[in-house]
Every structure is written in C-alpha cells, then in structure tokens.
Image: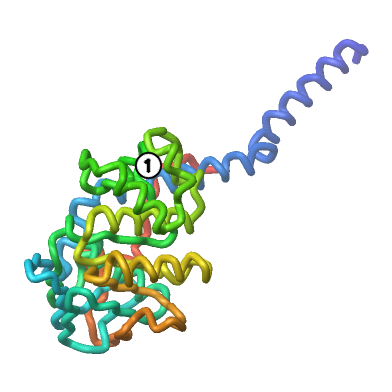
C-alpha cells in the first residue's frame, strides 16, 4: 500500500467517524430544541382551548348595586388547589366602612380577583357598585401607560380635572415632585417606586371620589410615614369612601374598623378548566419528532 493510499484511507475513516459522532456532539442542542418545541406546542394547544376554559364550571353571580354597598351571599371561590369562602355566609359592607380581610396569600388573591370580576368561577353572589365607582389597588402598584395625567383619570379615559385640584391631591399624598412631569410620556411603571404608585392611586381616588377603594395589601406595603399620610387622607378627604383591604395588615393604628377571615372549604367546588377531574394531569400531546 502506497503512502497516498494510506492517507486516502485515513481521510475516509475520519469522515465516517465525524459523521457518526454528529448526534453525540449535538445531543445537548437537540434536547434543548425538543424541550422548546414541546413548550411551544403546549402553549399553542392552550391558546386554542382558551374559549372553552371553565365552560362547564359553575360561576359566581356578579351584579351591580346602586346603594354603594358590597354584599357577598354564599360566596365560594373555586381554585385549582381548593375552594375559598368567607367566614360568614352573608356579608354586607356599607359605604364608608373600612374592612380588613385576612387569609393566606393565595386566598387573598382569589378574593381580590373575584371582587374585581377577573375570576368568575365558584358559586354564590357578589353585589357591588358599578366598576367606575371603584378603584382597585393591587400589589405591586399599577400605572397605566401614557402620561401621569392620564393615569390620574384611569380608567375614566379622557376625563380632565382642574389643575388646582390635581395640585392639592398630589400634595396630600406627598407627590408634589412629579407635578412638573404630568404631561410627559414615559415608562412610569418603572420610574416610580411601588410606594409612589400606591400614593398615585390614592391621589386618583381624591380626584375621582369613588364609593370604594379595594386594596390587595397595598396599604400595608407602605412605610410608616407614608401610611400615616394616606390614613390622614382617608380621615380628611375620603371619609365617606369605603376601604376593603384584602391582605395581612397589623392595623396598629386602628384604621380598619371591621375584620373578616377567609377559610378553606373542603366541600366546595374545585376549578377544573375543562370539566375533567384529571385535566390538570393531562399530558400535552407531543408533536411528531424524529427518532434520536
């Protein structure tokens, strides 16, 4: 065998070896690709079934009242991990009351979403004022896109307020420093701290004069000095506005005059998105993949 023939054989052997090692060398990349494809397929299947989500599950009756009260009758809030219910079967919260609702973090979030109308699955009835008569304060705070002036009128888009009233409202909550930027568009949800966002929501309440402020622990998240300022605003400017705080709060100042407790109901309905008890354990159908 000549030296040239030997080199040809060596080259052919190397090519065959590299070809056979391709799957070994690229196994991690193939595994990442397959996992990504399965996640995308799962997301696509979920989107296609959104219109049928909870179609067979019972829902909470949500009605509007015009006397300013919030009523909960035989309320049950269904979740994937269980059912949440207030400690009392019939609850009436009158205008101007300051009510503290206690439970674990999941229970509090479920009630907040149920009262706001974002979570409708469960049973019983919630009667509340019209949406435009209520201001919701989630945690962390929320600022609508656009200018700060439009954020003060949210969700009443396009509503304008007297500049002097805006000045007084901002001063009452300690936000005088943002007044020069009211008409400036920016990513205010990033520029403002969470405490400033909550204070802006209270300034919005001063201007809009809602019947109720619904908070998901937003007041408890404020530092002591800011909290005292906000409580003074409710004592002075918003004395006739009801406050429903759904979340843990030490209530050391006695701001809340009434408390309720959420409980787990082991006999209540559990939310099954597709009406199938095994829905949560159903595997997503995998797309056809080549054998590796």
Identify the residue shown where x is 48% and y is 65%. Answer: 226
- When asked about the image quadrant of residue 146, the answer is top left
User: How far from the left and from the top, in percent, is residue 133?
Assistant: 17, 59
Work out whether residue 37 or residue 65 is closer to the camera in this orientation and state it: 65
User: How far from the left and from the top, in percent, is residue 101?
Assistant: 33, 80
Relative placement, left or right, of 56 versus 217 is: left
Residue extending farthest left: 66
Work out whether residue 87 or residue 284 is closer to the camera in this orientation and state it: 87
Mark 1 Cα shell of 10 Å, populated few (<14), some (14-19), many (≥20): many
Residue 199 visible here: yes
Residue, disc 1:
148
Identify the residue shown where x is 14% and y is 68%. Answer: 128
Residue extending farthest right: 3
Label 1 element class: helix
Work out whether residue 87 or residue 79 is closer to the camera in this orientation and state it: 87
How many discs mark residues in the rendered view? 1
Q: As displayed, is residue 86 above or below residue 17?
A: below
User: How far from the left and from the top, in percent, is residue 289?
Assistant: 45, 42
Work out whether residue 120 or residue 21 is closer to the camera in this orientation and state it: 120
Quarter the C terminus occupies: top right
- When asked about the image quadrant of residue 58, the answer is bottom left
Colour setting: rainbow
Quarter the N terminus occupies: top right
Residue extending farthest front: 164
Identify the residue shown where x is 41% and y is 53%. Answer: 171
User: How far from the left and from the top, in percent, is residue 184?
Assistant: 41, 33
Identify the residue shown where x is 38% and y is 45%. Answer: 41
Q: As displayed, is residue 278 above or below residue 89?
A: above
Residue 278 visible here: no
């Amino acid at each position: 065998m000549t030296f040239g023939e030997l080199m040809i054989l060596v080259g052919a052997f190397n090519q065959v070896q590299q070809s056979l090692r391709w799957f070994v060398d690229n196994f991690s990349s193939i595994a990442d690709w397959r996992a990504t494809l399965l996640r995308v397929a799962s997301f696509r299947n979920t989107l296609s079934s959104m219109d049928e989500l909870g179609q067979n599950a019972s829902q909470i009756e949500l009605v509007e009242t015009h006397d300013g009260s919030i009523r909960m009758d035989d309320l049950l809030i269904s979740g994937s991990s269980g059912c949440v219910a207030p400690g009392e079967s019939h609850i009436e919260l009158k205008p101007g009351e300051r009510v503290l609702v206690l439970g674990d973090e999941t229970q509090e979030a479920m009630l907040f979403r149920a009262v706001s109308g974002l979570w409708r699955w469960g049973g019983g009835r919630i009667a509340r004022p019209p949406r435009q008569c209520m201001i919701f304060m989630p945690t962390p705070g929320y600022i609508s896109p656009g200018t700060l002036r439009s954020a003060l009128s949210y969700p009443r888009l396009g509503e304008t307020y007297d500049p002097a009233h805006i000045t007084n409202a901002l001063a009452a909550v300690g936000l005088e420093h943002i007044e020069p930027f009211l008409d400036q568009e920016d990513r205010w949800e990033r520029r403002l701290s969470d405490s400033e966002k909550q204070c802006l929501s209270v300034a919005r309440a001063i201007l809009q004069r809602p019947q109720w402020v619904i908070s998901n622990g937003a007041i408890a998240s404020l530092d002591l000095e800011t909290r005292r300022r906000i409580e003074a605003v409710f004592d002075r400017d918003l004395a006739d506005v009801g406050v429903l705080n759904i979340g843990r709060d030490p209530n050391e100042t006695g701001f809340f005059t009434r408390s309720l407790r959420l409980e787990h109901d082991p006999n209540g309905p559990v939310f099954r998105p597709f009406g199938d008890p095994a829905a949560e354990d159903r595997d997503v159908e995998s797309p056809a993949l080549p054998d590796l």
